[in-house]
Image: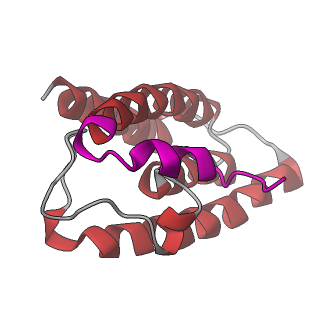
Amino acid sequence: MLWVVVQAVLLLIYGYALITTPAVEWGAIRWLGAPLILVGAALGMPALIAHGRKLTPLPEPNRTLGLKTTGVYAHIRHPMYTGLLLLAFGLAILFQKPWGVALAVALTVFFNLKAREEERRLSRCYPQYADYQRITGRFLPRWKK
């Protein structure tokens, strides 16, 4: 439950920073935020759809879903986290909010820790998870050799 509370607090602080903190002038760099937002949505939405109503914010595996290894999960173990992080960075850059970028970094650290805990639990739940880890990246696709 602590994972959910910390995640909610970080996301609320991030949203507050986007709305209330002053913007700075980053010029054309701000437009780099738009493709990050699009890619984040393109990764996150299929993952959300794959989980449907069985989605949970807890790092505990939902055994009724089974181990997801197809679609975006064939390339990335945590596409929802990746999508959310790309959205967070993209919005902060687009709206030129330094505090938003700083909090997106904090979210990156948090989701990395949460993903590690989730992966420990998935490894206990699914014996084939270790093989899946070897062929996929945590947040980005693993480059084939």
Residue 137, magenta (yes or no): yes
Q: Quadrant of the N terminus?
A: top left
Residue 125 relative to residue 118: left or right: left
Q: How many marks?
A: 0
Q: Position of residue 30 (x, y in %)?
A: 76, 53
Q: How is the image coloured?
A: secondary structure
Q: Position of residue 15 (x, y in %)?
A: 39, 42
- State the extent of the magenta-drawn residues as a range: 123-145
Residue 41 at least partly seen: no
Residue at 54% x, 35% y: name it. Answer: 104
Residue 22 relative to residue 45: left or right: right
Q: Position of residue 51 (x, y in %)?
A: 26, 68
User: Is 31 located above or below residue 2 in the figure?
Assistant: below
Q: Position of residue 111 (x, y in %)?
A: 43, 34
Foreground: 132 or 57? 132
Residue at 32% x, 75% y: name it. Answer: 49
Residue 13, magenta (yes or no): no
Residue at 68% x, 47% y: name it. Answer: 93
Residue 8 relative to residue 120: left or right: left
